[in-house]
Amino acid sequence: FGDRLMQRGKQHLLTVPAVAVALASPLLVLGLLAPQWQWAMVLFFPAILLLWLHVGPCYSAVQGLVPSTSRATASASILLMQNLFGLGIGVPVIGWLSDQYRPEWGVDSVRFVLVGAVSVVTLVAAALLKSAQFPMHAGPVRLRSQSPRWRRRRVKQRFDSGFRQAAWQRIGQSGQFR
């Protein structure tokens, strides 16, 4: 399905994850608000599957945007940010918010805080849909110094300056070639 969308443009690589994440959001909310754990599991299973659909296309989009020499760094940066925010900052913030709302909502405070966290997932879906509107570059982004045209110009400048310097040494003080 995603390959057919990609025929319209590379930016549609992010359309499938956007739709999948948008479909997962209501399932997550319904699962969190389910009165019985069995219903919650039934609703969480397809939601988690839909949430994992974003992994391949998002990594592929990043790999296509950076030069081939920086692909490992780009993947490591994504993993760092996911773990830093998801596991490092996300868990303590959810726990702190749950403790803050516990006097009002009791033991269900964590449930309602997690429902609020699903709004972040919905924002991700909106951002992916918005990014699918803009065309992606045909290939990796190149720095000016990496482009072949720029490289040829620099080689020519170095050659010309070396040639001029050698010519001046040959001419010397007398103004004639030696």
Image (spheres, helix red, strand yellow):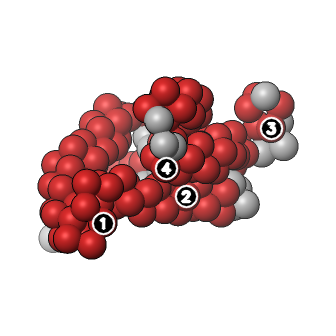
Closer to us: 174 or 41: 41
Q: Mark 1: which amino acid?
A: Trp
Secondary structure category for the residue under label 1: helix
Q: Vertically, is 98 above or below 49?
A: below
Task: Tell me the tag on residue 5.
Answer: 3
Q: CA distance from mark 3 to mark 1?
A: 45 Å
Where is 59 relative to 166, above or below? Answer: above
Query: Which tag is nearer the camera, tag 3 or tag 1?
Result: 1
Q: Amino acid at mark 3?
A: Leu
Figure check: 128 above or below 6: below
Which residue is pictured at 43% across the width and 32% down the height?
Answer: 37
Say if mark 3 contacts mark 2, CB within 8 Å. Answer: no
Residue 22 place in picture, x, y as percent: 63, 50
**Image x and y of residue 134, in percent:** 69, 61
Task: Name the quarter where the N terminus is drawn.
Answer: top right
Report which residue position mark 1 lands on.
Answer: 105
Residue occupied by mark 2: 122
Residue occupying image coordinates x 18% and y 56%: 95
